[in-house]
């Protein structure tokens, strides 16, 4: 069952677009959507085109990593320093350390709160007992 798989791991949740969207809604309610937004931006940089890499890296820096950034992510100083320095010469995996750090934060904290939340419980209940459809 699709919704049940989301509880297996954060990776399962994030690789299912519906699961990721529901997780995003939960994070907005908690005022903590910046971690997922950063993770998604890092994925876009990793799998995007080489021609857009520099501009995407600059946008990510301004949005998530610069001092006073509007969606600043809370990562340790060492990881922040390595990441910011790496952005001087961006490449596909320049955000790997920061992305892994953010993923682990979500995995150890937010993911478990999501699984216990009314948001997930409601989706799970609807998946187990779908409403009947009237195809007239």
Image (tube, rainbow, N blue to C red):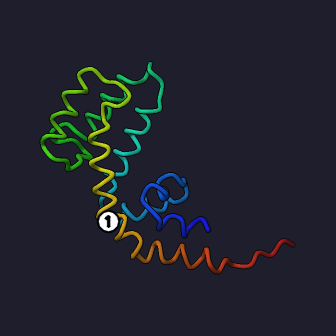
> In the rendered image, which residue does mark 1 sit on?
30
Q: Quadrant of residue 1?
A: bottom right
Image coordinates for residue 24, horizontal then vertical, percent: 42, 58
Residue that appears at 15% across and 39% down: 67
Residue that appears at 45% across and 73% down: 119
124 to 70, vertically: above or below: below
81 to 89, vertically: above or below: below
Q: How many marks?
A: 1
Image coordinates for residue 86, horizontal then vertical, percent: 23, 27
Residue most toward the front?
Answer: 8
Secondary element at image label 1: loop
Q: Quadrant of residue 112?
A: bottom left
Q: Closer to the camera, 33 or 3?
A: 3
Image coordinates for residue 100, horizontal then vertical, percent: 31, 46
Give left or right: position of 27 versus 65. Answer: right
Give left or right: position of 32 versus 120. Answer: left
Image coordinates for residue 127, horizontal then vertical, percent: 61, 74
Q: Closer to the camera, 56 or 1?
A: 1
Quarter of the figure with the C terminus: bottom right
Residue that appears at 47% across and 29% down: 48
Residue that appears at 33% across and 29% down: 57
Residue most toward the right?
Answer: 136
């Amino acid at each position: 069952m699709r919704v049940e798989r989301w509880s297996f791991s954060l990776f399962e949740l994030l690789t299912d677009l519906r699961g990721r969207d529901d997780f995003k809604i939960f994070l907005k309610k908690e005022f903590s959507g910046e971690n997922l937004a950063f993770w998604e931006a890092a994925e876009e940089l990793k799998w995007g085109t080489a021609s857009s890499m520099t501009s995407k890296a600059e946008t990510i820096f301004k949005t998530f990593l610069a001092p006073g950034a509007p969606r600043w992510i809370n990562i340790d100083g060492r990881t922040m320093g390595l990441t910011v320095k790496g952005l001087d010469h961006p490449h596909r995996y320049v955000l790997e350390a920061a992305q892994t750090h953010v993923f682990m934060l979500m995995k150890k904290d937010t993911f478990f709160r999501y699984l216990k939340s009314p948001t997930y419980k409601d989706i799970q209940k609807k998946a187990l007992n779908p409403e009947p459809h009237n195809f007239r």
